[in-house]
Every structure is written in structure tokens, then in C-alpha cells.
Image (cartoon, helix red, strand yellow):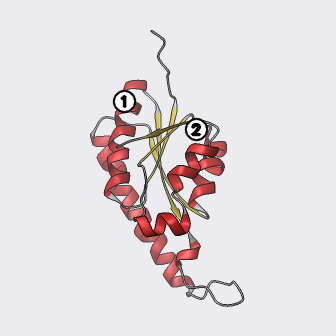
Amino acid sequence: MLRQEYKTILVPVDGSAIAEKALVTGTEIAKRNNAHLDILNVIDLKQFSVSFGGMIDANGDVVYQSFEDVEKYLEGLKKHVEEQGVTDVAIHVRFGSPRNVIARDFPNDHETDLIVMGPTGLNPVERVLVGAVSDYVIRTAACDVMIAR
């Protein structure tokens, strides 16, 4: 039986329980494949208030504090993953569109061969207005994508 081996696995997280369940799956796959695991959070600057001119209205302290909070959250996830037996793990924070960063930018930069993510981190109304990130990633990613339920 042919078995796909993965060497670089990406698990994007957004603080939701669904994303953290996907991290459990990604951790198990990384252990079985002795693979590198990347844990990524994408900060979408659109979440901050925007002025009519399109410039970020929030002062830099708000963005910086958000970055620090995310980094602290990711450090906790990394420690937990390492306790589960995965030693080759890195955390990343990127700014931008989660859809594009997860589907194309990050995998291209890190030679990702598997993305493991939850079905969605949005509520039904947000999915209609914004579109599910996971749907976009499934359609456009150049590597394998696993939706962990």
C-alpha cells in the first residue's frame, strides 16, 4: 500500500476550538511522518478600524498588542505540541489576508506539502459575507489540504 509522506505540515490557527482540534490532527501526522510542523496565525489588518482614506485608524499600539497576544498564544500551542512529542515545530505570525497567506504565500515560502485546518472558524453569517477561508484554501492551494473535523 502506497503511503503519502509529508515533510512540512502547516496548521493555521485562529484561536477557535475547531482550529485547535485541527492542530491535534496535524500534530499526530507530524509525529507519524517525523515531519516539521508550522503553526501559523494570520492577523487580518481589516479587523482594525479603517478610515475613509483606507489607512489603519487604530494606533500602532493596538496592532503591536495584538501581535504580542498572538505570539504568546502560539508559544503556548508550541509548548503543548512539543509535549506531545513533536520537536521540529515553529510558530509564525503574518499580517495579510488569511485566505491568500494560508493558501499560497506561506506554503510557497516554506515548501509546505500538507495544510491541516478546521472546516471553518467563522459563524454562518460571517461565512456568507466573507466566505470560508477553508473553502478558498481547498480550491487554490498547490499542496494537499486536509480538513480535520
Tell me where residue 109 appears, x and y as whole percent: 65, 45
Judge from the rendering whether residue 83 lies leftward or rightward of residue 113; answer left or right: left
Q: Give the number of the disc on residue 71.
A: none
Q: CA distance from mark 2 to mark 1?
A: 16 Å
The residue lying at 57 percent from left, 34 percent from top is 113
Does 106 sit above or below residue 70?
above
Circle 1 sits in a helix, a strand or a loop, which is it?
helix
Q: Which is nearer the eye, 69 or 134?
A: 134
Tell me where residue 40 appears, x and y as whole percent: 49, 53
Does 114 sit above or below residue 14?
above
Circle 2 sits in a helix, a strand or a loop, which is it?
loop
The residue lying at 46 percent from left, 77 percent from top is 65
Q: Which is nearer the eye, 64 or 121?
A: 121
Tell me where residue 25 appears, x and y as whole percent: 35, 38
Q: Which is nearer the eye, 50 or 39?
A: 50
The residue lying at 62 percent from left, 83 percent from top is 56
Q: Give the number of the disc on residue 112.
A: 2
Does 2 sit above or below residue 90?
above
CB-based contact (under 8 Å), mark 2 and mark 1: no
Judge from the rendering whether residue 92 lies leftward or rightward of residue 124; answer left or right: right
Judge from the rendering whether residue 142 lies leftward or rightward of residue 15; answer left or right: right
Q: Which residue position is annotated with label 1? A: 31
